[in-house]
Every structure is written in structure tokens, then in C-alpha cells.
Amino acid sequence: QVQLQESGPGLVKPSETLSLTCAVSGYPISRGYYWGWIRQPPGKELEWIANIYHDGRTYYNASLKSRVIISVDTSKNQFSLRLTSVTAADTAVYYCARLRSSSWYVDYWGQGTLVTVSS
Amino acid sequence: QSALTQPASVSGSPGQSITISCTGTNSDVGGYNYVSWYQQHPGKAPKLMIYDVSNRPSGVSDRFSGSKSGSTASLTVSGLQAEDEADYYCSSYASSTALVFGGGTKLTVL
């Protein structure tokens, strides 16, 4: 059973960097699939942020690319997200996810973690 | 404005069928058979219901079905049940942005 669990601060100050980690259990990241981050502002729709493949290949949402870094640590079976220069508009539930590389659908989601940007 | 257009809400009575549309362009829905649908109950993570336009993952009821015509994909829920009440999101691979979502549709079971 594949499980994903997000962790990181729930409160980040404006202009600072949001950092989240997703611990994966039940499946080795090194075996394949895309691993990604998707967010959902309160009461709003889902927004894809970025994906990474086990070999380090990355894919970014063009609208966020300048502020986002996604990385993977196969030895710890986890991957991470860094979003710089955050504003209130970055307040959202952040989900980590496993995506099929062939057709980009999410077959496993983390439970999500709310990150609030506020001073 | 979302990349993919969905109706804000749909409703139906128990036992009835409803269809949710998802309209994109030739650069996403119309250009690839990579449309997926997700069900999201309040406070929960989304759940995959349909992938690659019309395929159901193991464990998803056959009351859920998907289709596509041109740049519009559709999710049909037949035999509506109270537990189907949720938000539904479509998603598609897109040549310009890789992955795009619709704005979501709230399904109300009357």
C-alpha cells in the first residue's frame, strides 16, 4: 500500500521560503513514476506545482517556476518542495502525490498539509 | 480563471444520472487522451475516479464513467447515491503547462 505523508511548518512569514517534505512508504521512489506537489487554496481549485522523476528530471508549472525547487532523496525515499518569496496568495493545502509518467494522472495523494502565509 | 472549464454545480436526485463537462482546447483535452477525474469530499484529499478519459481504477464503482468528444470531456455518474455528493475536478495533460485542472464542480444529491 503506497502512502505519502507531508511534513513542514504550518505557518510561514511573507517573503520567506516555504519548505515541505513528502515521505513515501510502500513503494521505492527509485522504481519510477513522477512524484509531485499540488496545492489548493481554501475554497478554490487544485493547482499543479511541480513533478520530479527518480533520476532527477523536473517539471515545473510555468507560473511558479521562478520560485520553486523540487528535489528527491531516494536514500530516504522522500522528496521535497521549496517555494521562495511567499505571499498570502500561497496560502493553501499542499498535497504531495504520485503521478503516472505516461499520462500524468495522480493515483496516490498525501493527506495534505495547510500552510498559511502570515506575519 | 482555470485552464479547464467546468460547471460550478450540478444536482440530481438519488437514482438519477448526471453529467459533468470539462472543456479545454486542442492543446490539452482535445490533443491528448490524458483526461482524469477526481472526487473530493470536504476536508479530504482528492480521489482518482477516471484516468485516460474512460478508465476506472480498481475499486471505483462502475456507476462512474468518462468520455471525450473533441475538446470536451465528460464524467457521468449514474444511479446517484448520497455518498456521491462531493466536488469533482477534471485534469488533463497540456502541451504548454504539463498538468492543468478544472475549476471544480459541486455535485449535490437532492
Image (cartoon, rainbow, N blue to C red):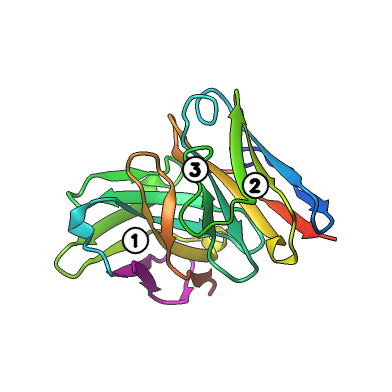
Question: Which residue sits at x=38%, y=65%?
Answer: A17
Residue A40 visible in the current orientation: yes
User: What segment carries the magenta color?
Assistant: A1-25
- Type of residue at label 2? Gly
Q: Position of residue B105 (x, y in %)?
A: 70, 50
Question: Which residue sits at x=41%, y=66%?
Answer: A16
Above or below: residue B33 compared with residue B42? above
Res B103 label? 2
From the image, state whether disc 1 or disc 3 is nearer to you. 3
Question: Which residue sits at x=48%, y=69%?
Answer: A112
Return the disc, 2 or 3, that comes first in the chain's sequence. 3
Q: Position of residue B13 (x, y in %)?
A: 84, 56
Foreground: B71 or A71? B71
Q: Chain of mark 2?
A: B
Res B55 label? 3
Per the model, the C-alpha gap separating discs 2 and 1 is: 24 Å
